[in-house]
């Protein structure tokens, strides 16, 4: 099997984000759920390679959809781990702070919009703070699954996982409680570094 994609190590221990995220939930989320997207992406690449070798393109549609799902799951989770830190919760600064205030009015309004994007998801998905390069502004995307409902060409600055596997063990079905807890460990410094690179 190909190993194009690999599960990244977390930048902190499984117990580092408690009480916002329990060690059990973080380990399950990283070592099982994220790992499954990595495995799925690599297996799908193998299936596509085998189909090309056999000159059989009858499953190109379903395999393309599966590849987008698994790669997007891997990319979003890899970013998600860097959006949190044990020393989190401090407000953004610099260019990111200025852009948030310009495009959303205040940090509080941005947080409320991202919280609502999670709570109002129909099914599974994410809330994403993204830089939209055409209008040159920050927008909030409500991402269905891992890959749907995204503005093409936008670049991710900060993401919140709204799939049940991200919160159910700790918060049951209370998505709002999970999003509030996320802001206690959010890493705005990392987000600011990404934003500065995009600008």
Image (spheres, grey):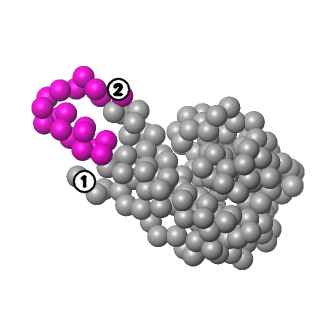
Crowding around mark 1 (Cα neighbors within 10 Å: few <14, some 14 to 19, many 20+) is few
Q: Secondary structure at mark 2?
A: helix
Residue plotted at (47% across, 70% down) = 9
Residue plotted at (58% across, 45% down) = 154
Instruction: Estimate the x, y position of residue 167 in percent, counting from the top left.
Output: 67, 53
Instruction: Estimate the x, y position of residue 56 in percent, counting from the top left.
Output: 17, 26
| 60 horizontally vs 199: left or right | left
Q: Quadrant of the C terminus?
A: bottom right
Residue plotted at (36% across, 47% down) = 41
Res. 61 mark: 2
Queried whether the magenta region covers residue 156, the answer comes back as no
Res. 2 mark: 1
Q: How many numbered circles are shown?
A: 2
Give the mark nearest the N terminus, 2 or 1: 1
Q: CA distance from mark 2 to mark 1?
A: 21 Å
Q: Is residue 190 visible?
A: no
Q: Nearer the viewer, residue 128 or 21?
A: 21
Q: Is residue 20 above or below residue 103?
A: below
Q: Secondary structure at mark 1?
A: loop
Queried whether the magenta region covers residue 56, the answer comes back as yes
Span colored in magenta? 43-62
Q: Is residue 43 visible?
A: yes
């Amino acid at each position: 099997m190909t190993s194009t994609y690999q599960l990244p190590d977390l930048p902190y221990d499984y117990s580092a984000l408690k009480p916002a995220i329990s060690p059990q939930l973080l380990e399950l989320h990283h070592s099982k759920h994220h790992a499954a997207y990595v495995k799925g992406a690599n297996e799908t690449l193998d299936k596509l390679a085998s189909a090309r070798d056999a000159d059989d393109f009858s499953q190109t549609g379903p395999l393309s959809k599966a590849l987008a799902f698994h790669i997007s799951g891997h990319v979003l989770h890899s970013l998600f781990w860097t959006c949190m830190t044990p020393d989190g919760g401090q407000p953004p600064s610099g260019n990111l702070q200025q852009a948030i205030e310009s495009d959303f009015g205040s940090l509080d309004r941005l947080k409320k919009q991202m919280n609502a994007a999670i709570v109002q998801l129909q099914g599974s998905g994410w809330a994403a703070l993204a830089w939209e390069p055409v209008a040159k502004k920050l927008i909030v995307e409500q991402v269905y699954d891992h890959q749907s409902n995204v503005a093409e060409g936008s670049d991710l600055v900060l993401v919140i996982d709204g799939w049940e596997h991200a919160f159910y063990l700790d918060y049951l079905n209370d998505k709002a409680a999970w999003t509030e807890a996320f802001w206690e460990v959010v890493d705005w410094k990392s987000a600011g570094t990404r934003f500065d690179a995009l600008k």
